[in-house]
Amino acid sequence: MPKKSGRNTKGRIVAAAWKLFYEQGYENTTVEDIVFESETSKGSFYHYFEGKDALLGSLSVLFDEKYEELRETMDPDMDAVEALLYLNRELFSMIDNSVATELLARLLSSQLVTRGERHLLDRNRTYFKLLHGIVRRGQERGELRADRTANEIVSAYAMFERALMYDWCLQNGAYALSKYAADMLPLLLEGYRAAP
């Protein structure tokens, strides 16, 4: 039980931080603001994070929480391509509506220079486990090509999503990320659909 409580505390801190980063900007958000918004304590904050900068890598945690939520609402009989498009649409809509381009750019750039853990590439994330399950199930059902491994398909999908997020940041959010992905991602995924 304490582990679940700890996860909830860390999750509340992460959610509060990213909400404030979006509303007030990263520079204008203090640790005190985050503690107040998350209804936790400074001790709890520093138990999980060395400081505000350590929260930059936590965006992947926020994304994974969204994926956990989506996993619960997804129809298990949904076609694999449709399931992948659904996940992308929901996550990118969340990014459009609650993640500033500056913050996503900071996360992406931190992953380029980090010597430690690269959160976005961590195969133990809910993101990768969910994608792998969808792709494997799609291959078993004959919906996706079997001449590529599930890992290869998941890697291509994840790389394509990162590329779209990177471009969105470069363009300073000049377009709706979710709409652009809805136009472009099917082109990639149709290439992995099994021949009829």
Image (cartoon, rainbow, N blue to C red):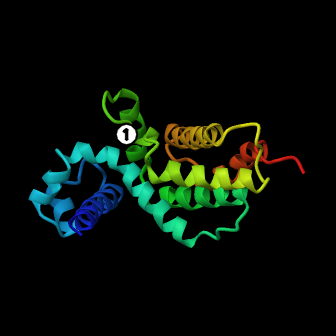
Quarter of the image for the N terminus: give it: bottom left
Identify whether 120 is placed above or below 130.
above
Relative side of 83 to 91, left or right = right
Secondary structure, mark 1, is helix
- Give the labeled residue for mark 1: 106
Name the residue furthest front. 140
Q: Is residue 66 left or right of residue 52?
A: right
Where does the image place residue 147, in percent across and percent down from the top left? Answer: 76, 37
The residue at the point 90 percent across, 51 percent down is 196
Residue 81, given in percent of the width and then of the height, sits at 72, 55
Please tell me which residue lies in front, 188 or 136. Answer: 136
* Residue nearer the viewer, 170 or 90: 90
Dot 1: few (<14), some (14–19), or many (≥20) neighbours within 10 Å?
A: some
Position of 100 with respect to 135 (left or right) is left
Q: Outermost residue, left direction?
A: 43
Residue 176 shows in the view: no
